[in-house]
Image (cartoon, rainbow, N blue to C red):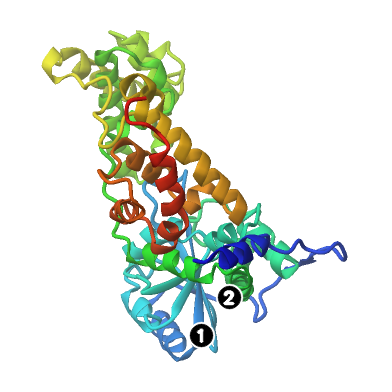
Amino acid sequence: MTDAQETSISNAARPPAREEGPAPVPLLEPREGIPPVTAAPEALAEVVEAFAAGRGPVAVDAERASGYRYGQSAYLVQLRRAGAGTALVDPVGCPDLTALGEAIADAEWVLHAATQDLPCLRETGMRPARLFDTELAGRLAGFARVGLGAMVENVLGYSLEKGHSAVDWSTRPLPEPWLRYAALDVELLVDLRDALEEELERQGKLEWARQEFAAIAAAPPAAPRKDPWRRTSGMHKVRRRRQMAAVRELWTARDQVARRRDVSPGKVLTDAAIVEAALAMPATVQALAALPGYGHRMGRRQLEQWLAAVQRALALPDAELPQSALTPAGPPPPRAWADKDPAAAARLAAARAAVTARAEELNLPQENLLAPDTVRRLCWEPPGEASESAVARALSDLGARRWQVEQTAPLLTAALSAVPSDV
């Protein structure tokens, strides 16, 4: 990229502020009204036919029952396409949506915060080949607020009612106000996509966005997290390995109950209650019942199952207790770098400053210019040759997209070269 091109992008990087004037227009009803919920195979076949015959991009959204049900499954899938209108599909009544996904396989899917919805859509058999993420597009374009409501208001001048985003979408039948909200979520999504594409083109960032969208569409499903019990809220209070074992046993027992009952784990036993029991290590039902989170509303049978988990932890031999911390797969925490490798710490400070400055010039979040983990890994184990081509190869190997490499390889090369190896 030439200096002139860089200057052009920098000067055009800021999105136009919405001019002061009339208040946003409330969007109260879908254009064709609230469509019926598709919950039977015969009705789904009609939706598949309609969307296969539609034209242009397809707006796609999904509603989950986070905080109510176990897992992150979709309980409603919303779609809208020119020539087909809006469809509200119930994955409970129609759990296999493979045919619907195939009907729109040739189209670009428009989602807001795609990485949140793609896993639950994948469970139903729907996988996009191409997508446009309006939230990510807003980030790359430099918008400060990138929630769907804020984007629709700032870009299109309409206000969306967002009061039902955290309701229990597993409820059946779904109330009409919720269905109206769900239909409106895809009402203007393609219009927003078109406006953001134009803005990204104006800023010289459209190709960057396309590379990001392609990476999201091609990404494999996330691997299961190792030792998920370590993410229990309040875990920082638990210091001893046997107490950690109690957290692990309680977390595992809770997870099994939650999965069997199909409810959110937090509704079975709170994280705070798990930590309280792990710290106290009660020996009797009475001692457990006296702890916060195990009050009079909990029956003796429930108390006994949680006490059994604590007792399993107490019975473990020392060799089977969990380690205090997982061995990191990558570099150690940056706070430890100054002691472990002062030169690496200096490289990281210089690299972070360079990336931050460039992100500010381009008016986009630093983490979208280059993932912080990529910066850390590069600085901890820099290429043997401090050349721009070597740094570019290292960034590519770490998963950076082509546009990110082009924007950051020169400045990271300079940052790495400026730090002596014997700091």
Q: Which residue is mark 2?
A: 190
Q: Residue drawn 31% across and 11% down?
A: 281
At label 1, counting other C-alpha atoms closer than 10 Å, the crowd grade (few under 14, some 14-19, many 20 or more) is some
Q: Which residue is mark 1?
A: 56
Note whether 250 is above or below 15 in the view shown.
Answer: above
Which amino acid, mark 2?
Val
Mark 1 vs mark 2: which is more N-terminal? 1
At label 2, counting other C-alpha atoms closer than 10 Å, the crowd grade (few under 14, some 14-19, many 20 or more) is many
Which residue is more in the foreground, 44 or 388? 388
Question: Where, by quadrant of the figure, is residue 14 drawn?
Answer: bottom right
Which residue is more in the foreground, 369 or 20? 369
What percent of the width, then of the height, locates residue 78?
50, 70
What percent of the width, then of the height, locates residue 348?
42, 35
Could one spot residue 175 in this view of the protein? no
Q: Secondary structure at mark 2?
A: helix
Q: Is 119 on the left or on the right of 189, as rendered?
A: left
